[in-house]
Amino acid sequence: MKLPGQDAIARQADEHLVTYRVKLPRKVVEHPIRQVAKRLSMALFVLVVTALIVYADRDGYNDNAGGGISLLDAFYYATVTLSTTGYGDITPASESARFTNILVITPLRVLFLIILVGTTLEALTERTREEWRLTRWRSTLRDHTVVVGFGTKGRSAIRTVCATGLRKEQVVVVDPSSKVVDAATAEGYAGIVGDATRSEVLKQAEVHRARQIIIATQRDDTAVLVTLTARQLNRGAKIVATVREEENAPLLKQSGADAVVTSASAAGRLLGLSVLSPSAGMVMEDLIQQGSGLDIVERPVVKAEVGKTPREVADLVVSVIRGHRVLGYDDPAVGRLELTDRLITIVRKTPATQVAPDIRPMPPMPRNT
């Protein structure tokens, strides 16, 4: 089966030139005017301290114009000295003044210059710091989650995963839009601007060392190519993808996806359930929102539960995973729980009384006439 636009994307994938850009989350930066004001204040402070030091030892300085060293002369000397102008009309004459210049004035001069050219130095070292951050980031990235596509589906998916305990530092977002990646980094995720259908871009996201990959692209043909590329780079990662058309789901599974969600059909089923029973729709919406209210979770069977039936477990068991089979809680094949089983249960994450994700009055049930 050939999807729309597949030939065009395949031709692009054959190109040798691969463009990408890695963006890491940044800390909140001060306003530029505030930064300049702070540096000017520091420079002025160094100037005042230098002038006061010179004025305190004014008897050890010689003025070629004659007369003693006034406070104005001290500020004048501090200015021409810190700026390395050095006219030479006022010079340290005594040993104490020269000693002070060596141990105090010279370090203050260096500090003054660093403050003034701090912006330039920061620009020169920014590249080195960024390379160091990227190298350190890649060296520590293991068993992470890669999200391809940070639209509504990708953003909701990763927020759900993070609600179960995944740290934002363990998430890498890949998207061709620079603005989308900027939005991802603003939320604390690392981002890569590039075409995820190209293996070089996915390698920058360290896909070969990822534990799970979420593919939430806008097009089904793109999702197929990304899945093929990701599975080729990582044979053991769990790949979950979404498609718009249900007929493309088998193709994604053949490409290497472990689970495929049809977004349009899933939304339609929830709509249909809400029509039949608005209360049931609210409960289902609460179940798929992890971290609040009621959550549906998968966990292993503990030793105390071995030999019991699903109904005897403290948690509300929905299904039992035995091997590669998913059995209902009332399936006769389940029998007694085994230590290698896994349970899909419904648990309460918060002590709130409502089961719905928002507070809405229950609609009145229609009366039979």
Image (spheres, rainbow, N blue to C red):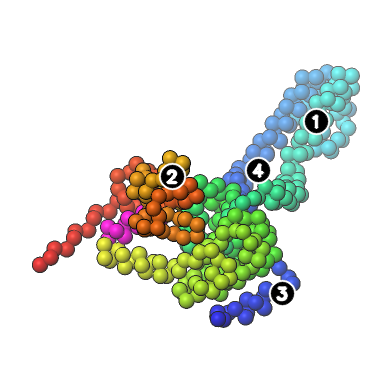
Q: Earlier in the sequence, mark 4 or mark 2?
A: 4
Can you tell which mark lies on residue 107? Answer: 1
Can you tell which mark lies on residue 15? Answer: 3
Can you tell which mark lies on residue 38? Answer: none
The alpha-carbon separation of the residues under discs 1 and 3 comes to: 55 Å
Q: Earlier in the sequence, mark 1 or mark 3?
A: 3
Residue 55 at x, y percent in the picture? 77, 22
The alpha-carbon separation of the residues under discs 4 and 2 comes to: 67 Å
Q: Is residue 285 above or below residue 82?
A: below
| Residue type pointed to by label 1 | Pro
The alpha-carbon separation of the residues under discs 4 and 1 comes to: 22 Å
Residue 103 at x, y percent in the picture? 83, 25
Can you tell which mark lies on residue 306? Answer: 2
Q: Earlier in the sequence, mark 1 or mark 2?
A: 1
The residue depicted at 46 percent of the width and 43 percent of the height is 302
The residue depicted at 41 percent of the width and 45 percent of the height is 307
The residue depicted at 34 percent of the width and 45 percent of the height is 312
The residue depicted at 29 percent of the width and 58 percent of the height is 280
Q: Earlier in the sequence, mark 3 or mark 4?
A: 3
| Residue type pointed to by label 3 | Glu
From the image, tell me which residue sits under label 4: 36
Q: Closer to the camera: disc 4 or disc 2?
A: 2
Asked if the stretch drawn in magenta spans residue 95, the answer is no
